[in-house]
Image: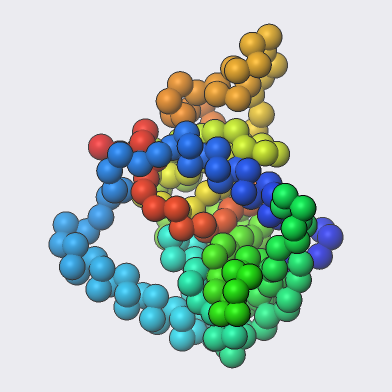
């Protein structure tokens, strides 16, 4: 279960990883989109509505990872609304900057997701996280997949060091980050360990590394190195 001691998706780590990657991978243009913006927007709205109506115990429930969220667990959804169709258990995530964060464990088709919600009365979901390989992108990429699989399925990637390790983002999956099992080789130059890839673009250097966790945070835009 993601909510127990076996899994360590820590709020502080997630925030650190996200902030560094966003700094290194700022967008200069949107990622690839439908040529007809209105059609694309309508399709996205329809997909959100459909997934927000799914019960988490149904055999046909989505387990897709995308910019909206993970399966039927979407950013912006209220916890009370989610709990009406999915098993939800309250938890407290390790403190970031001295303050514990409100979290919730959600079970989808027998697999676990952890969400972070706002501290306001509406308790809307602001981040969706998992270490469970059952959840995958439309390109079949999830925890345990290689960075090469991510790059080939979802466009060029950027990489940056965050607190606790390296994270990659793909050009065609804005708002989704992937932590990987890789560390740069030892160097006498400390800056080389933090920024081993000029411009954040690792090319194919990380292809053999594996994804160890992922989260949907909703920061819009694609990696600068992945646009064009």
| Numbered circles on residues, count | 0
Query: As drawn, is 168 to the left or to the right of 48?
Result: right
Residue 34 place in picture, x, y as percent: 22, 59
Farthest residue to the bottom: give it.
84
Residue 30 place in picture, x, y as percent: 29, 48
Question: In the rendered image, which quarter is residue 94 located in?
Answer: bottom right
Q: Which of 15 and 97 is in front in this view?
A: 97
Q: Which residue is drawn at 60% across and 18% down?
A: 191
Residue 49 place in picture, x, y as percent: 38, 81
Q: Which residue is drawn at 68% across and 54% down?
A: 11
Please tell me whether residue 25 is drawn above or below residue 32 in the rendered image.
above
Can I make out residue 109 in this image?
A: yes
Q: Nearer the viewer, residue 58 or 12?
A: 12
Please tell me whether residue 125 is drawn above or below residue 12 in the rendered image.
below
Query: As drawn, is 217 to the left or to the right of 89?
Result: left
Farthest residue to the right: give it.
5
Farthest residue to the left: give it.
36
Q: Residue at x 50, y 76 (%)?
A: 77
Question: In the rendered image, which quarter is residue 80 located in?
Answer: bottom right
Residue 71 place in picture, x, y as percent: 51, 71
Give the position of the C terminus as an image quadrant: top left
Farthest residue to the top: give it.
188
Give the position of the N terminus as an image quadrant: bottom right
Q: Residue at x 50, y 68 (%)?
A: 75
Can I make out residue 63 in this image?
A: no
Please tell me whether residue 139 is drawn above or below residue 187 in the rendered image.
below
Q: Which of 97 and 150 is in front in this view?
A: 97
Colouring used for the render: rainbow
Question: In the rendered image, which quarter is residue 152 located in?
Answer: top left
């Amino acid at each position: 279960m993601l909510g127990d001691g076996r899994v360590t998706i820590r709020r502080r780590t997630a925030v650190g990883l996200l902030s560094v990657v966003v700094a290194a991978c700022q967008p200069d243009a949107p990622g690839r989109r439908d040529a007809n913006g209105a059609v694309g927007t309508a399709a996205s709205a329809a997909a959100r509505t459909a997934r927000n109506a799914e019960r988490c115990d149904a055999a046909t429930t989505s387990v897709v990872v995308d910019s909206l969220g993970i399966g039927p667990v979407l950013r912006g959804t209220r916890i009370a609304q989610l709990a009406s169709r999915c098993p939800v258990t309250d938890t407290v995530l390790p403190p970031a900057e001295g303050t514990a964060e409100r979290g919730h464990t959600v079970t989808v088709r027998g697999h676990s997701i952890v969400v972070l919600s706002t501290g306001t009365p509406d308790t809307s979901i602001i981040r969706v996280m998992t270490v469970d390989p059952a959840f995958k992108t439309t390109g079949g990429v999830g925890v345990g997949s290689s960075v090469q699989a991510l790059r080939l399925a979802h466009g060029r990637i950027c990489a940056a060091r965050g607190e606790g390790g390296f994270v990659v983002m793909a050009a065609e999956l804005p708002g989704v980050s992937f932590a990987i099992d890789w560390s740069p080789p030892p160097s006498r130059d400390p800056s080389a360990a933090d920024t081993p890839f000029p411009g954040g673009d690792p090319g194919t250097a990380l292809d053999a590394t594996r994804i160890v966790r992922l989260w949907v945070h909703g920061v819009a835009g694609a990696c600068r190195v992945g646009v064009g």
